[in-house]
Amino acid sequence: MNEVILETRGIRKAFGKQNVLDNVSLMVPKGCVYGLLGPNGAGKSTLMKMFSGMIRPDEGEIYFNGSKWSRDNLKDTGVLIEQPPLYENLTAVENLEVRTLLLGIPKKRIQEVLDIVDLKNTGKKRAGQFSMGMKQRLGIAIALLNSPSLLILDEPTNGLDPFGIQELRDMIRDFSDQGITVIVSSHILSEVEQVADYIGIISEGVLGYQGGMKQGKDLESLFTDVVRKNRGRELCC
């Protein structure tokens, strides 16, 4: 495995009496696309929010580039979780201008990220009038403003049509080719299979598998085995 950019050791998280993550230890190599797979409610979004500083683990540690994670690491992290954080009454440029002012980023970066996500010709059209795919791309542009080395995308294909999914897939591979590490979560095996170099499969809060994508490997069977095993574990404990 290549040098690791993000690692968790024994992460546990509960909300009230519900255990959401149970002893999760994963390793994300630098420069790869890491696909985090799992059924809805498996704990993927909770883990992504931990990487983004939105919530904290009850137990365990997160490491970024070999050191314990701190909020300083957010300057090297881009995040798109759930819905893109857009001001729908503002244009694409205006949405980005707000963030550059807040983050102290030069305005020239706005056109750079709009070029990357192919939104440079939207003019005075407001974000509220954008298609779902355009909104998703603007959300990614916002996540790229700080030139992150790690990009976190939680269920990014939700609501997209087939053309939008293909565009997003190509974009993710381009980010990896540029040296950006991408963590993308999904419950859709075929989407992750087409972009990921490494995968982790989480079910009932347990990381049941982690490893590289191998040519000819039956991902569906592997996924089903992990989900069934951990559902059985949940029921009998």
Image: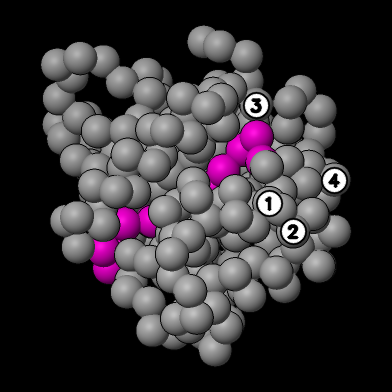
Residue to which mark 1 is pinned: 109
Check disc 3: other Cα within 10 Å, few if <14, some if 14-19, many if 20+.
some
Task: Name the element at disc 1.
Answer: helix
Say which amino acid is labelled 3. Ile
What distance separates the C-alpha of mark 3 from that of mark 4?
15 Å
Q: Which residue is mark 3?
A: 5
Q: CA distance from mark 1 to mark 2?
A: 5 Å
In the rendered structure, which amino acid carries the disc numbered 4? Asp
Q: Nearer the viewer, mark 4 or mark 2?
A: 2
Disc 2 marks which residue? 107
Residue 63 position (above or below residue 54): above
Q: Position of residue 152 (x, y in %)?
A: 54, 47
Mark 3 or mark 1: whose residue is earlier in sequence: 3
Instruction: Compare residues 44 and 122 and report the one nearer the observer.
Output: 122
Look at the image and give the residue range highlighted in magenta: 148-160
- Mark number for residue 148? none
Sequence order check: which comes first, mark 1 or mark 4?
4
Q: Is residue 134 left or right of residue 221?
A: right
Amino acid bearing label 1: Arg
The Cα–Cα distance between marks 4 and 2, rounded to whole angstroms, is: 22 Å
Give how far across and how far down residue 182 sits, in percent: 50, 37
Which marked residue is nearer to the observer: mark 3 or mark 2? 2
Q: Tell me the distance, in whole angstroms, between the alpha carbons under discs 3 and 2.
A: 28 Å
Residue farthest toward the bottom in the current orientation of the protein = 89
Q: Which secondary structure, mark 4? A: helix
Query: What residue is at 62 percent from the left and 14 percent from the top?
Result: 3
Between disc 4 and disc 2, whose residue precedes? Answer: 4
